[in-house]
Image (spheres, rainbow, N blue to C red):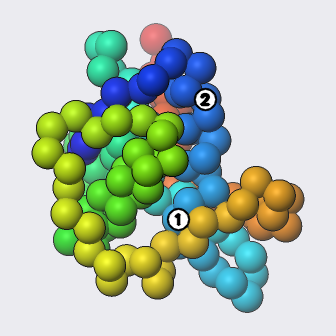
């Protein structure tokens, strides 16, 4: 996970929505699978790959170096758009993820089915 700092409290929802439009695309069926999420825990914020969240939940996870590279690319991209600041050293960017990472513009959003493989904040606890 990469710890980040948000410029304003309103940035949370903006980043969260933006992340729904960045991921791996199935072009023929126009489905975009969200790669990363913005996690808020104890007053701190993190950009996480959905497979990192599975691991945090104690579920099996098959996270790969390419998944981490994609997470790093997305975090640096959000930072370049002045949406957040990465805390600590800026991660290295692996350009090999550029070809497989799709960014859908807000205007194209309705033409795609946006799917998340992990849902933050939806606990299945009964109590």
**Above or below: residue 119 compared with residue 32:** above
Question: At numbered mark 1, what does the secondary structure look like: helix, strand or loop?
Answer: strand
User: Which residue: 26% across, 62% down?
Assistant: 68
User: Which residue is labeled 2 in the image?
Assistant: 13
User: Which residue is labeled 1 in the image?
Assistant: 23
Q: Could you say where residue 83 lies in the image, as x and y percent from the top left?
A: 50, 38
Q: Is residue 96 visible?
A: yes
**Above or below: residue 123 compared with residue 70:** above
User: Which residue: 63% across, 41% down?
Assistant: 17
**Above or below: residue 27 compared with residue 90:** below
Image quadrant where one finds the N terminus:
top left
| Circle 1 crowding by C-alpha within 10 Å: few under 14, some 14–19, many from 20 | many
Q: Nearer the viewer, residue 4 or 26?
A: 4
User: Which residue: 60% across, 66% down?
Assistant: 103
Q: Is residue 106 left or right of residue 64?
A: right
Q: Could you say where residue 97 lies in the image, as x and y percent from the top left?
A: 37, 77
| Circle 2 crowding by C-alpha within 10 Å: few under 14, some 14–19, many from 20 | few
Question: At numbered mark 2, what does the secondary structure look like: helix, strand or loop?
Answer: helix
Q: Is residue 28 left or right of residue 54?
A: right
């Amino acid at each position: 996970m990469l710890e980040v700092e948000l410029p304003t409290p309103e940035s949370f929802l903006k980043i969260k929505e933006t992340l729904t439009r960045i991921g791996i695309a199935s072009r023929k069926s126009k489905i975009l699978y969200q790669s990363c999420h913005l996690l808020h825990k104890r007053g701190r914020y993190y950009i996480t790959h959905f497979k990192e969240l599975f691991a945090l939940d104690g579920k099996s996870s098959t996270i790969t170096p390419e998944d981490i590279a994609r997470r790093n690319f997305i975090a640096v991209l959000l930072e370049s758009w002045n949406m957040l600041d990465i805390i600590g050293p800026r991660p290295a960017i692996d350009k090999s993820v550029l070809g497989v990472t799709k960014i859908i513009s807000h205007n194209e959003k309705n033409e795609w089915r946006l799917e998340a493989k992990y849902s933050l904040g939806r606990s299945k606890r009964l109590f």
